[in-house]
Amino acid sequence: MIVDEDHVAAALAYLGDDTSAAKRYYDATTAKNFADLTYAQRFLENAGSVAERDARAIADPEYQEALQHAAKAESLLEAHKAKVQSCKMICEIFRTENANARAAERIR
């Protein structure tokens, strides 16, 4: 068999850990909100036309740092989502392999 019970146990343990998922979603959301807040503050602080204020807000180093932090948090969230899909696939492969084994035993 490709997937054994240890793989399934590890996958189910990861899927059952909802604190990790909640933390990833929280971090991504708060980082995005902070980046939006930083942009808005920099936009309102600047004078000039809307395009000038927008350009200055985007070019602000603190806003750029906030965007980097948000991108990192989003990356971790996407990695978590990929791991969840992988865990689900491991469980599905295990089910399929066991169903095939039971069907093969019935044929004998």
Image (cartoon, grey):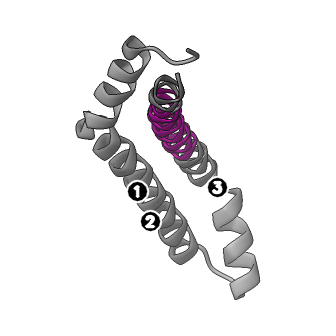
Task: Please state which of the two labelled residues, at mark 2 or mark 1, is closer to the viewer.
Answer: 1
Residue 69: x percent and y percent? 53, 42
Disc 3 secondary structure class = loop
**Disc on the earlier residue, 2 or 3:** 2
At x 33%, y 50%, the residue is 26
Q: Position of residue 60 (x, y in %)?
A: 64, 55
Residue 89 belongs to magenta span: yes
Question: Secondary structure under badge 2?
Answer: helix
Q: Position of residue 3 (x, y in %)?
A: 51, 18
Whole-angstrom CA distance, mark 3 to mark 1, is 21 Å
Residue 83 falls inside the magenta stretch = yes
User: Which residue has dot 3 on it?
Assistant: 60
Nearest-to-viewer mark from 3 and 1 = 1
| Classed neighbour count for the residue bearing mark 3: other residues with Cα under 10 Å, few (<14), some (14–19), many (≥20) | some
Q: Residues within 10 Å of mark 1 (few under 14, many from 20)?
A: some
x 52%, y 21%: residue: 108
The vertical placement of 45 against 90, above or below, is: below
In this picture, residue 73 sits left or right of residue 63? left
- Residue labelled with disc 2: 37
Q: Main secondary structure of the magenta part?
A: helix
- The residue stretch that appears in magenta: 72-99
Of residues 70 and 54, which is closer to you in this image?
Answer: 70
Q: Amino acid at mark 2?
A: Leu
Going by the numbered disc 1, the residue's amino acid type is Thr
Q: Which mark is residue 29?
A: 1
- Hey, what amino acid is under mark 3? Asp
Extreme front residue here?
108
Q: Nearer the viewer, residue 100 or 77?
A: 100
- Rendered-image quadrant of the N terminus: top right
Between marks 2 and 3 in the image, the one whose residue lies nearer the viewer: 2
